[in-house]
Image (tube, grey):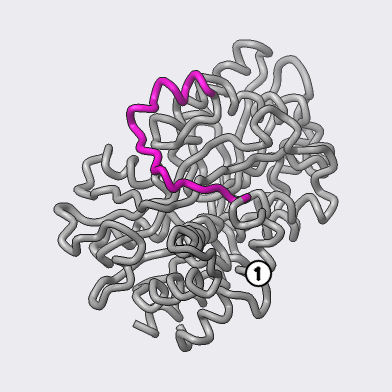
Amino acid sequence: MKNFKTLGLITATLFTASIALTACGTGTKSASTPAASTAAATTAASASPKAEGGKVTITLGAYSVVKESFDLIIPKFKDQWKNKTGQTVEFQESYVASGAQATAIIQGFEADIAPLSLEGDIQKIAEKGLITHDWKNNPYKGNITASIAAIGVREGNPKGIKDWADLTKPGVEVLIPNPSTSGGAKWDINAIYGAGLKASEAAGKKDPAAAKDLVSKVYKNIKVLDKSGADSLTTFDKGVGDAIVTYENELLARIQSGKKYVEVIPQYTTSIENPVALIDKYVDKHGNREVAQAFLDFLYTPEAQTVFAEKGFRSVLPEVAKKYEKNYTTPAGLFNIEYLGGWDKVNKELYGKGAIWETILAEGGAK
């Protein structure tokens, strides 16, 4: 088991240095590395007209979980833009773990728009001066989708898993992505840690030590630390593990596709918010702000939000959320990132150097 985990960590490290661009849809270009995609996107977009007719390129740097949604959303936008302006939009697309994607953008992958898993990943890009506007200044605080952290188990729930504590039982093999590369993994760890705080609080005292202990015990049963949430689900699809900690929308999408999985919603879990931002420095370099902004705005339309909802996300638009509310269960003990003190505190105290997660890794032995 240790060798399996080590391989996951090594793979995640190497993957950050080499990101593949995935092409989707007619008229979509692809490249094998961030450098190659940057050159291609820059050449195409710089030569493209800003207004009527011709072609224009948008480079999308996204986290892996949203790929299936964008496979449907992008053609809808291309048709709409073509009808409105006569201009053909081509997309360069990259889908990798959120943390790795943010790092690639900072290191020179010239994404025009970045739909990522975490506010913190977008903020890292902003802190490097690549985003110069207030990207959270809209009614949705920059978020395009919502979800909750849940547990996926196999048909019949043979291990009898009902809550986070059941993931600590002997013989239960758990899958979770690696928080060093995956934004989804941070949401997953937040959920378990926050549940520990909530449980101790219900017993009389909010106890960080009890929360850490719960995460530590779950960690000891982790079978694989994949580099992204999508990869973790692929591993689960192959029959590895008894339970997977993941986004609810990922489980619902798998179940809708015919997978014999069961969603388990713990008593205490976290809400998840996934942001998007336009990368000002690269958009201005490419001269494609008009179409890039139009695509970002399109993500908030009922048409795009319905696609997200059909893929299991909780919509940020009230009218779409209401339409699909029967598909979801909201536990009474649901909490948000503010319960944990906000992302600045969480990144420092839970994921920072020498912080809780790093201590748990050290105490659990080499992985």
Q: Position of residue 26 (x, y in %)?
A: 50, 31
Q: Position of residue 159 (x, y in %)?
A: 19, 64
Above/below status of 218 relative to 259 = below
**Image quarter (top left, top right, bottom left or bottom right) of the C terminus:** bottom left
* Pointer 1 local density, CA inside 10 Å: few below 14, some 14–19, many at least 20: some
Residue drawn at point x = 77 percent, y = 18 percent: 51
Name of the residue lying farthest toward the top: 84
Q: Position of residue 2 (x, y in %)?
A: 39, 84
Kind of element beneath mark 1 = helix
Residue drawn at point x = 54 percent, y = 64 percent: 206
Closer to the camera in the image, 128 or 93: 128
Q: Position of residue 219 (x, y in %)?
A: 42, 74
Residue 28 placement, left or right of 280: left
Asked if residue 57 lies in the magenta stretch, the reply is no
Residue at image mark 1: 349
Residue 185 in view in this figure = no
Residue 288 placement, left or right of 145: right
Residue 367 in view in this figure = yes
> How many numbered circles does the render carry?
1
Closer to the camera in the image, 356 or 256: 356
**Image quarter (top left, top right, bottom left or bottom right) of the N terminus:** bottom left
Above/below status of 354 relative to 17 = below
Name of the residue lying farthest toward the front: 204
Q: Could you say which quadrant of the image residue 341 lies in?
A: bottom right
Residue drawn at point x = 55 percent, y = 49 percent: 63
Asked if residue 321 lies in the magenta stretch, the reply is yes
The type of residue carrying mark 1 is Glu
Residue drawn at point x = 44 percent, y = 66 percent: 226
Closer to the camera in the image, 45 or 125: 125
Instruction: Specify start and end residues of the magenta stretch as a single range.
Output: 318-338
Above/below status of 194 relative to 207 = above
